[in-house]
Image (tube, helix red, strand yellow):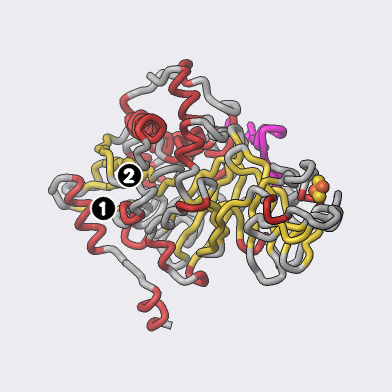
């Protein structure tokens, strides 16, 4: 059981909290590079409960800083992006992307601009994303050694979707595999599926068994079910420090991806999804169908967005949200067209985790043996946050990014009877490992 105190430590991400300090040891994928245009007005960015602004100067450099001007705290959101920096419109002080004060025109000489700094964070760009390190400027960590980050930008796809709940709640939805046969596929009858439809195994056995273990990058589970007489259908998935997941919605051999659940504040999360465009997964395969070729209800892939606004939490919000009950279709729920009545697998997960409220009261839960991955992941996060707070121990991956290297998720059918971790190692070795060199040669 998770106590109220543990729940609090796990979920609060503001400055000075145990988990907030853990998150500040890592690079955080915060924006799409395309959101910031050279010379354009700054945008508001909420991250780990801090109100920030982001802008790109005329040389293409990105600044991410506290939105308050260090003079009298006017919001730099209203600032003018002028050449090599951002000028506060109140008294005209100007700051570069590193927070240095370039100009103090309202102060008669001699001014003291070398003594004033805006609170700016370290920023880097990779894979079409702007990454922010919110810890001390002097000790920027390495970027995680995900395989997806080795690929050239044109091989990577990126999506952002905001979720209206705490990051851990959203993340736990990803490592809760036993919901799949209900929330997403409760209306699917095995008789109606083609022989080669992977969903077959899920709906034949809706209570899979698991192996699970701590790993260098966090935690891993393998759900397994019989697949015919001598084979097993395996689904591997990972939690990776501090807020990443890899899910089994693609073929293990080529499912190169990473999914971040970035805390905007305690009650809002940005889902940041990077995937290899040539991998075989839910993003590249057509919508699943029944044997007769009709689409399986509720498995649509498109997400409808509200227009972005300039609010702190105004980016990448879905049209279906708690305010309209996620557009649940009760008729579809009742007649068995869509088990949940909610269209789209992502939206189903979104609705469920948002329906729990902003932050779950974990003392109210009754966890089952099928929730072991969730329990283990909470413990791993909590132990790491406390070790950092109490002994100054760097959490996994914060200093040594290579811990992420061998993390892969996905499904496969195998007749190998080895130990589950050996099977994993063999599948990983046999999988596709594109490198920028091989990709360029193939084109
Ligand atoms: S408050 Fe920004 S220049 Fe005065
Ligand atoms: Fe799901």
* Residue 210 magenta-highlighted: no
> What percent of the width, then of the height, locates residue 388?
39, 35
116 lies left or right of 188:
right
> Within 8 Å: ligand 2 and the Cβ of disc 1?
no
Say which mark, if any, is on residue 285: none
> What percent of the width, then of the height, locates residue 144?
40, 55
Q: Nearer the viewer, residue 45 or 283?
A: 45
- Residue 202, image quadrant: top left
To which residue does mark 1 refer? 413
Say which mark, if any, is on residue 201: 2
Work out whether residue 316 can be spotted.
no
> What percent of the width, then of the height, locates residue 271?
55, 47
Q: Are marks 1 and 2 in contact (CB under 8 Å)?
A: yes
Which stretch is magenta?
313-334
Work out whether residue 72 can be spotted.
yes
402 lies left or right of 265:
left
Q: Residue at x 43, y 38 (%)?
A: 180
Q: Residue at x 49, y 43 (%)?
A: 24
Q: Residue at x 69, y 60 (%)?
A: 96
């Amino acid at each position: 059981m998770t106590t109220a105190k543990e729940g609090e430590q796990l979920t609060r991400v503001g400055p000075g909290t145990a988990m907030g300090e853990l998150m500040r040891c890592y690079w955080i994928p915060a924006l799409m590079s395309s959101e910031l245009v050279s010379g354009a007005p700054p945008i508001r960015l909420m991250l780990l409960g801090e109100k920030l602004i982001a802008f790109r100067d005329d040389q293409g450099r990105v600044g991410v800083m506290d939105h308050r001007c260090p003079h009298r705290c006017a919001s730099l959101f209203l600032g003018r992006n002028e050449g090599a920096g951002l000028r506060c419109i109140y008294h005209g002080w100007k700051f570069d992307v590193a927070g240095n004060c370039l100009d103090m025109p309202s102060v008669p000489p001699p001014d003291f601009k070398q003594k004033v700094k805006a609170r700016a964070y370290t920023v880097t760009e990779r894979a079409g994303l702007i990454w922010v390190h919110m810890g001390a400027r002097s000790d920027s960590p390495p970027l995680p050694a995900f395989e997806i980050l080795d690929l050239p930008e044109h091989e990577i796809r990126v999506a952002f979707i905001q979720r209206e709940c705490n990051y851990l709640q959203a993340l736990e939805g990803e490592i809760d595999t036993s919901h799949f046969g209900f929330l997403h596929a409760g209306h699917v009858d095995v008789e109606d599926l083609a022989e080669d439809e992977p969903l077959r195994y899920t709906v034949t056995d809706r209570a899979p068994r698991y192996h699970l273990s701590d790993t260098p990058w966090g935690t891993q589970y393998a759900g397994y079910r019989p697949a015919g007489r001598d084979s097993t259908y395996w689904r591997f998935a990972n939690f990776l420090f501090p807020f990443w997941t890899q899910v089994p919605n693609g073929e293990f051999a080529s499912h190169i991806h990473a999914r971040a659940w970035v805390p905007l504040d305690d009650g809002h999360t940005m889902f940041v999804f990077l995937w290899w465009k040539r991998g075989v997964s839910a993003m590249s395969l057509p919508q699943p169908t029944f044997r007769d070729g009709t689409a399986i209800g509720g498995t649509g892939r498109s997400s409808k967005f509200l227009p972005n606004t300039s609010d702190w939490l105004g980016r990448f919000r879905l049209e279906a949200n708690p305010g309209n009950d996620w557009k649940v279709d009760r008729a579809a729920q009742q007649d068995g067209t869509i088990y949940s009545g909610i269209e789209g697998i992502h939206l189903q997960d979104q609705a469920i985790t948002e329906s729990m409220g902003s932050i779950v009261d974990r003392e109210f839960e009754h966890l089952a043996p099928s929730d072991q991955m969730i329990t283990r992941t909470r413990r791993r996060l909590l132990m790491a946050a406390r070790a950092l707070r109490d002994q100054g121990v760097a959490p996994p991956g914060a200093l040594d990014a290579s811990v992420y290297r061998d993390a892969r998720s996905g499904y496969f059918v195998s007749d190998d009877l080895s130990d589950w971790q050996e099977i994993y190692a063999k599948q990983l070795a046999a999988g596709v490992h594109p490198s920028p060199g091989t990709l360029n040669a193939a084109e």
